[in-house]
Image: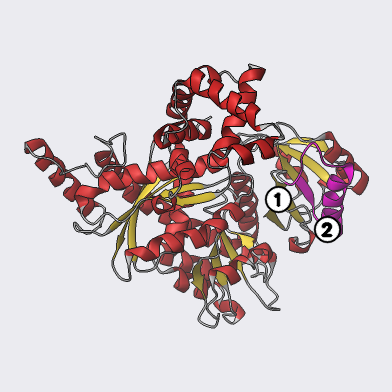
Amino acid sequence: MHVEDLLRLESLDLTLLWGGPPLLAREISGVTATDLEDPGRFLQRGEIVLSGLVWWSAADEEGTADRFVAALRDAGAAALLAGEETHGTVPEVLVDACRRHGIALFSVPVHTSFRAITDTVYLRQWGDLSRRPAATPYALPENVRGELSRLLADGAAPDTLLARAVDRLGTPPCYVFSATGRTIARTPGAPALSAAEAAGRLKAALRVDPDASPYGQWFLHLPGTVEVPPRMLHEIAEVFAQYRQGVLRREAAACGAATELLGLLGLDTPGSGSRSGPGSGSGSGSGSRSAAVAAALRACGLPEHGPYTVVEVSLGAAGGDAAEALGEVLRHLAGHRSVMGSLAGGRAAAVIATDSGSPEDVVPALKELWPTLHACDETVLPYGGISTTAVTPTELNGALVQARYALTAAERAGRANLTAIDDLTTLDALLAGVPTDVRTAFGIHALGPLADATNPSHRMLLETLDTFLAHNGSWARTAEALHLHVNTVHYRIQRVELLTGRDLARLDHKLDLKAALLCR
């Protein structure tokens, strides 16, 4: 297959931005998708390069695009296919760089996936191979491909698939990793690696599915000096792309049952973190709810008796697949069963049951794993909230409320953060979980006229109040901090008391105003 053949494929809808006949006549040896700023060491000669241009921003200097394209030229890349989704168009500076370095450049519209391009190229190449009279070392033999297809259909373990796929190479050490360094498969001669060790090798690994999300991506890694034809690597990766799709289908079925369970738990979600929930109280309604929750737990494969932990996750304003992100970290938890479902607003939640070990292990394990989610996609901030342990199913509703409250506190922190309900040990942390509209309403009513921060006099009084409370009501230290006379501080605090109707000699009134300041 040649570069110019890509333009003839109407299904891909590619647009040639630059490239003359000699460049379009180049033969394509394979496909690599990358968003590294310097991808040269991961490319093979003759490959077309797919890039979403995440590595580039409008603020970058011209040299950024120039270095990227120069790396493609030095590696012998056949062409660059640049996605339009990230920036809305292919930057002109990239077109200029391709013109200087002699790399054909195509734009990929939003409706064309990188997976479609990869499949098209390799299906075309496999068709070319089948017409050749002799076997070629640059593809898996037909009998191996047939066996791998049968193993996939029979539900073989990933270790078995990987070992058979590389058997022709003498079964060298080989791995399939997840985006967070979880080992999905390894050959018998490959030593076990920790998640941190595996994550350090991802940059030198081949993506299994170019269209997978940053959290659902898998990587094929062959360490050492084994020479493997690039086409063979891509064919092995395609086997695991198919295996991954099967895993996703099975998980989607389980996700439906989990979403039903979470819906039951949220039917009477109280406004506070109380432990009222399914099965609490009296009456036939309560009893039927308990029975429904028990049935939902069984359908999810979870025990009908605790302990349980509830986790809720969002990916902030940037959005994304919160369920896929949460599912990836949950797969690291040994000794725990869990089910996960999607919620409104792009959030996801999971119920975790402990089969062995201790439920207290869940929180530290998740906190240790959380930075790996941010490393998968540094443009997105993953937020999470964790409940305390729910001992019985009747406490699951309250646990879901706790997880949601802790998630709100994590989101208000403004950074990739996983907050446990046990972390809310200060007034500031507690108030962080209160919904924004409630915080705003409380601040307005507690501060009275002072809530109007557009008034310079009010801003001055608020600053004095904040400093006064921060110095435990000390007139002298407040005056020193603000460089004021003590009498001026007395006058201002009297004005605060008059406008708010509070007596700052009383502890409860001090707490009210402190909370109001924190809610601004």
Amino acid residing under circle 2 = Gly
Callout in the foreground (1, 2) = 1
Residue 193 can be seen in this image? yes
How far from the left and from the top, in percent, is residue 99?
90, 42
Above or below residue 308? Residue 205 is: below
The quadrant where residue 303 appears: bottom left
Frontmost residue, 191 versus 3: 191
The answer to whether residue 320 of the structure is visible from this angle is no
Residue 182 is situated, as x and y percent measured from the top left of the image, at 51, 66
In magenta, the rendered stretch is 55-80
Q: Does 401 appear above or below 197? A: above
Going by the numbered disc 1, the residue's amino acid type is Asp
Q: Which residue is drawn at 46% across and 53% down?
A: 245
- The local secondary structure at tag 1 comes to loop
* Secondary element at image label 2: loop
Name the spot of residue 41 as percent of width and height, x first: 77, 63
Closer to the camera in the image, 429 or 316: 429
In the displayed structure, does residue 363 sit left or right of residue 352? Answer: right
- Residue pushed farthest right? 100
Earlier along the polypeptide chain: callout 1 or callout 2? 1
Residue labelled with disc 1? 35
Q: How many marks?
A: 2
Q: Who is closer to the viewer here, 14 or 372?
A: 372
Residue at position x 63%, y 49% in the image: 378
Q: Is residue 164 above or below residue 237?
A: below
**Residue at which label 2 appears:** 76
Which numbered circle lies on residue 209? none
Residue positioned 51% across, 41% down in the render: 411
